[in-house]
Amino acid sequence: MIEPAEPEGMSAGVVKIDDDQLPEGDVTIDVAYSSINYKDGLAVTGAGRVIRGDFPFVPGIDLAGTVAQSSSPRFRDGDRVLQTGWGLGESHWGGFSERARVRSDWLLPLPESLSPLDAMIIGTAGYTAMLAVMTLEEHGLNPGTARDVVVTGASGGVGSFAVAILSRLGYEVTAISGKKTAITYLTELGAASVEPREHLTSGREQPLEKAKWSAGVDTVGGEPLARLLAQTETHGTIAACGNAAGMELRTTVLPFILRGVTLAGVDSNTCPNPRRRVAWKRLASICDRDVLSRIHSRTVELEEVPGECRGIVAGHALGRVVVALNR
């Protein structure tokens, strides 16, 4: 397993443990793969107060693998399963370990068309993106009436999947990214156009700006989200699911009371299981081999996780990094 850095600055590292040291739960899993998310980067580096458990602690908010032992009637030994959220890697030991013990009501069966590797290329990032798209649809978004849909932080994990999903559902997607090197990558994922991040962080900020977007997925928060709200068309919706650009939101009521704009939050951590199953079923259908191969940046070993986490916190991420455990 990998231990994260404590707030005082202790180094993260890989250590060996016995099964009897695993936390409580009714299902023990041989973890095949996990993945590295921005939240994992904050946890492993100690850059953010993500971990709410006692140290030592195992981070990793995603896992996919095979049931090694189960006392739950819902799962049998050998079942392929996945977990995202429900405090995994935050309050309960997570996926950066060859074995994990969790509660059965946190687990989902792995969709038949997905391998454990596929599931962790998708992981919390793709699952969150799908929830964001579902939220937009529930607020009236459809290809017949929508014009431009925008995605911020588009070269990251959530943003990449949001671009791919929306484009495959028939929308004209504008991807916004701070990485000039990501233009080809985002175009290949289906973005109709790619704009630099400066379009949302420079110039004079107005309570209302020229309406540009029918809807959007915001993965970064802060000033870019405030500018998106000011640029959203009448009765448009922005689905917000990240805070890499800041937790503060300085805006006015004008987008809401003059244009009827909706700001909808997306919570992937405690999303009810019936909605999770719908999201994963749609992901298994939409995310074909072409999507997964383009978004899958690389697969790393457990020992490489601390370095990868430093990179994602520094903003160097492009696509998805998967962690191999029991392949």
Image (cartoon, grey):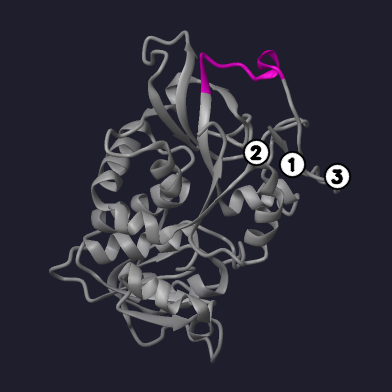
Residue at (65, 52) in percent of width and height:
41
- Residue that label 3 marks: 10
Question: Earlier along the polypeptide chain: callout 1 or callout 3?
Answer: 1
Query: What's the amino acid at mark 2?
Result: Pro
Q: Quadrant of residue 159?
A: bottom left
Q: Where does label 1 land, which residue?
A: 4
Residue 295 is situated, as x and y percent measured from the top left of the image, at 42, 59
- Please indicate, yes or no, whether residue 2 appears anywhere in the rendered image: yes
| Residue range highlighted in magenta | 18-29
Q: Position of residue 221 (x, y in %)?
A: 53, 65
Tell me the quarter of the image containing the N terminus.
top right
First in sequence: mark 3 or mark 2? 3
As displayed, is residue 21 above or below residue 316?
above
The reply to whether callout 3 and callout 2 are in contact (CB within 8 Å) is no
Q: Who is closer to the viewer here, 251 or 15?
A: 15
Specify the amino acid type for callout 1. Pro
Q: Secondary structure at mark 1?
A: loop
Q: CA distance from mark 1 to mark 2?
A: 7 Å
Residue to which mark 2 is pinned: 59
| Local SS, label 3 | loop
- Circles 1 and 2: CB atoms closer than 8 Å: yes
**Disc 3 to disc 2, how far (Cα)?**
15 Å
Looking at the image, which residue is at 70% across and 54% down?
307
Category of crowding for the residue at label 2, using alpha-carbon neighbours closer than 10 angstroms: few (below 14), some (14–19), many (at least 20): many
Where does residue 318 sit, x and y in percent of width and height?
A: 52, 65
